[in-house]
Amino acid sequence: SDKMSDKQSAQKSAKIASGAVVCVESEIRGDVTIGARTVVHPKARIIAEAGPIVIGEGNLIEEQALIINSYPENITPDSEGVEAKTMTIGINNVFEVGCMSQALKIGDNNVIESKADLGRNMILTSGCIIGACCQVNTCEVIPENTVIFGSGCQRRVQTERPQPQTLHPGPKNVPLWHSE
Amino acid sequence: MASLLQPDRVLYLVHGEKKIRSPLSTLYFCRYCSELRSLECVSHEVDSHYCPSCLENMPSAEAKLKKNRKRICNQLNENFRCANCFDCPCCMHTLSTRATNIPAPLPDDPSKTAMKKAYYLACGFCRWTSRDVGMADKSVASGGWQEPDNPHTQRINKLIEYYQQLAQREKLERDRKKLARRRPYMPLAFSEKYGLGTRLQRQRPGAPITSLAGLSLKEGEDQKEINIEPAQALDEVEPLPEDCYTRPINLPEVTSLRQRLLQPDFQPAGASQLHPKHKHLLIKRSLRCRKCEHNLSKPEFNPTSIKFKIQLVAVSYIPEVRIMSIPNLRFQKECQVLLTLTNPVENITHVTLVGCEEGDPEDINSTAKVMVPTKELVLAGKDAAAEYDELAEPQDFQDDPDVVAFRKSNKIGFFIKVVPQREEDGDVTVSFKIRHDFRNLAAPIRPSEEGDAPAEAIWLTHHVELSLGPIIA
């Protein structure tokens, strides 16, 4: 599905590359770029409030996932000296159902499991797995192949990376984004 | 308010070795003694073992030992673990077997390769795999996984055998001295069998371990002498590595205490030596009244079944008091609390409530005065078909509206008056006695002389405590 659409102004537009599948029921607000072969399921939300979001290729963003580039708590949109930071997401990541990610930089081949919660100051490298319901809000770079799991957010390093997900062709019979 | 229905709001007092106050839903009722029993005044017995993940039944310990007397060492090593299921050594979740296709050379023609299935163990929770510790993939889906051998196993087994033999010998000598005077012609081996045969002796605390009970000496069997070498103390110890203090710690490689101690025979310090262990079995237990030795709870043998063969739980015999609504409680002001009383049996039950007297030794927790209804409350029998029967005649009990708020099949709502006596923080607690009639349907010990007389009613009294919540200033 070949769709390119520019809404309203150049700043607040969603650029969707060819080969991506974005459902109409998803909510995409602000300056969002979505790479090829990325699938965005219905009820997913990608909100670029405090800056643009650039999403790479081959990602899977499942239902009710929330990727949001929002202002940090103590800064209001009107305060001075606030730069718009770009949130970058690499390739082949999986954002499972109901997760929330505010991390400004996410690398490749990561999996953010259901209902996980990533803070803004985190940086995921590659091959990381953030387990279900794990809230991680530290200011650090997560080393490669780290698995965070359990109610205490225990960590270990995995030696095996699971096979990259064969991406779904997207949900069937759901209205897709149309160019205007 | 759903919190009013929490089970710990209403406690019943159990008279046992210890006075225990506990919600009715956790108590049992011995209908032979006609008394409430809690988990602490019953004896717990193991019925059977089963694996929680594959739900396979294992015969009980005694049955195992009876069959395999000679293989003592293997029994102790098997240690009640499942043969098929494994636990993740990292997070203790159950491991699942995954398959991959790997190219492998054909046996007939090595130059060609075909896809062969290889199996490995993986944890879905922490993503541990058997490849992390270097375990090779197996070609069979189950049964190929072995736990690593412990180098000390032989020495430990020999020590165990030696000490078992020593214990047997000492016991025989003791019995020999006892029986020497009484029955000199009685075979010596019998003393052990009589010693641990009856249940009463088994229940003695400090009694010898029953797992060794079946190991009595057969008549005329030669006792093999087992000798052990004493442990030798060494002067020289392996020195620490030179970079012990300077080498930076690789944190992901260090095992946590929990991971280490769950494998007490190896206690590996490094995560690369954490091998999966077989899953521990769970038990099905039965409960027995200590006074009359009747079973109070006996589950079914099948692990997939949650039913019971015998289930003498208190909620099926004793009327249950529950809190329905509480007004704002005020210090030294009379408040009216609405309670419900439910009748679990099929016949009509008469209930009388009595307040606790001054100086009642059971009344230790109440912080308020309570006025309970003086008249007898009548509860209709529990009728399972009543909710479907639209033509049922309305019950005519002529309730006093000041006492009984409502009536619905086998349940009534009634009022009590509470006057909180203490202004401090904490819950207002009231207690009273509930006296009801109980028809014992257990089989009579002696046949009734008058033919089929209906079961006699006895009156039971229970001490009930209610926790009504804090005082609202």
Image (cartoon, coloured by chain):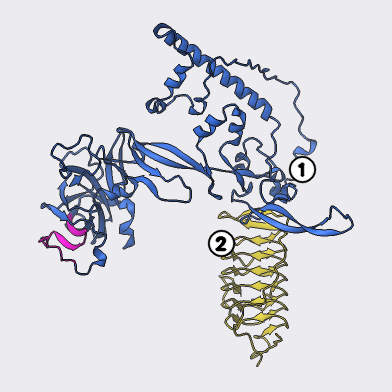
Chain colours: A yellow, B blue
Q: Secondary structure at mark 2?
A: loop
Q: How many marks?
A: 2
Q: Secondary structure at mark 1?
A: loop
In the image, farthest residue toward the bottom: A180
Which residue position is annotated with label 2? A133
Q: Are marks 2 and 1 in contact (CB under 8 Å)?
A: no
Counting from the top left corner in percent of width and height, residue B249 is at 72, 45
Which residue position is annotated with label 1? B247
Q: Give the magenta range.
A: B392-417
Question: Neighbour class for label 1 at 10 Å: few (<14), some, many (≥20)?
Answer: few
Q: Quadrant of residue B471?
A: bottom left
| Nearest to the observer: residue B334 or residue B307 | B307
Quarter of the image containing the N terminus of chain A?
Answer: bottom right
In this rendering, would A42 be left or right of B356?
right
Residue B400 magenta: yes
The amino acid type, in three-letter code, at marker 1 is: Arg
Quarter of the image containing the C terminus of chain A?
Answer: bottom right
In this rendering, would A165 be left or right of A114?
right
Residue B223 in the image: above or below residue A60: above
Q: Chain of mark 2?
A: A
Q: Residue at x 41, y 9 (%)?
A: B183
**Can you see residue B329?**
yes
| Nearest to the observer: residue B79 or residue A98 | B79
